[in-house]
Amino acid sequence: MIMRLAQSLGYRVVEVDDGDGTLAVGGHDGASSLRVGWRPLIVEGYTGSGSIDRFAIRTRDARHRESLRDMRERLRFPERDADPVELAAPILKLLAPGAYGVRRWPDANVHIEPFGENRSAWWYPYEAIGTEGTAVIPTDHWPPPGEETIARYAAAIEAGQRPLAILLRSEPPGDEQDCAAFLIDGHHKLAAYRRTGTDPHFLDIARLADRRPCEPDDLRAVIGGDGKLEQSAAYLMQYLEHAEK
């Protein structure tokens, strides 16, 4: 079922046998986690507040992920007909073993959900303005620092280039208006697309696995004992704990 969905959306299915697992996405959309260096970095899901709102929580652990310089260079200005699986090769080697879908996603319809001071981001799907399409969750500072880098990408985009930012998600999008994806790399590129008013282009990687939520320990780790975040995430925690039994 999930393989057919992925293929219908333009993903190329690839089996990762030798990934080292330093980068991993688990769960299903609405209850997924991103791990970097085997540590939970971000968990996203529904709040269960009675309205259809979603949130993401980021850990306070400031240790940085492993460098992806090779991948960044290859995706800076790729050939328009470049094979998406070949482009994704450096990041596929970092992923946990399993099946993934890889696609080039041009002219994407997305909104960006940055984290606030309390390490959380909140949004309401289906709103007429501001939250159309996929919710992109940054993994680094947003907006990104480095005006010269943004300006350089903006000039290239206006000249017709289409650099690829990278998304990693827990499953292919069943409903583009209510789904989330983690922005693994390309914060400056995405900022440049927004500046020029151009729809962004992505290399989009989706995990293909049984639909099970992420582990409750991932949510506990990113909350880190924060009482307010525990209260906000209580419904999602109950759901994860029940699914684990």
Image (spheres, grey):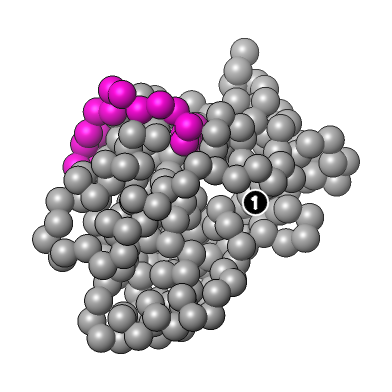
The image quadrant that residue 203 belongs to is: bottom left
Instruction: Please tell me which residue is depicted at 31% across the width and 81% down the height of the picture.
Output: 156
Range of residues picked out in magenta: 1-26
Q: Quadrant of residue 189?
A: bottom left
> Does residue 183 appear left or right of residue 205 in this picture?
right
Q: Position of residue 41 (x, y in %)?
A: 61, 41
- Can the viewer see residue 130 in this picture? yes
Secondary structure under tag 1 reads strand
Q: Pointer 1: residues within 10 angstroms few (<14), some, or many (20+)?
A: many
Q: At 37% from the left edge and 48% from the top edge, which residue is drawn?
A: 173
Q: Is residue 204 above or below residue 63?
A: below
* Quarter that holds the C terminus: top right
Q: Using residue 46 as the reference point, say whether residue 5 is left or right of it.
A: left
Residue type (three-letter) at the residue carrying disc 1: Phe
Q: Is residue 70 above or below residue 188?
A: above
Residue 25 point in image, percent of width and height: 47, 36
Q: Answer yes or no: is residue 239 visible.
A: no
Residue 233 picture quarter: top right
**Is residue 199 on the magenta stretch?**
no
Q: Quadrant of the N terminus?
A: top left
Q: Residue furthest left?
A: 81
Q: Nearer the viewer, residue 168 or 145?
A: 145
Q: Which residue is mark 1?
A: 55
Q: Residue at x 28, y 22 (%)?
A: 17
Taking the image as shown, residue 13 lies to the left or right of residue 155, namely left
The reply, left or right, for residue 14 in relation to residue 192 is: left
| Residue 145 in the image, given as x and y percentages of width and height | 59, 72
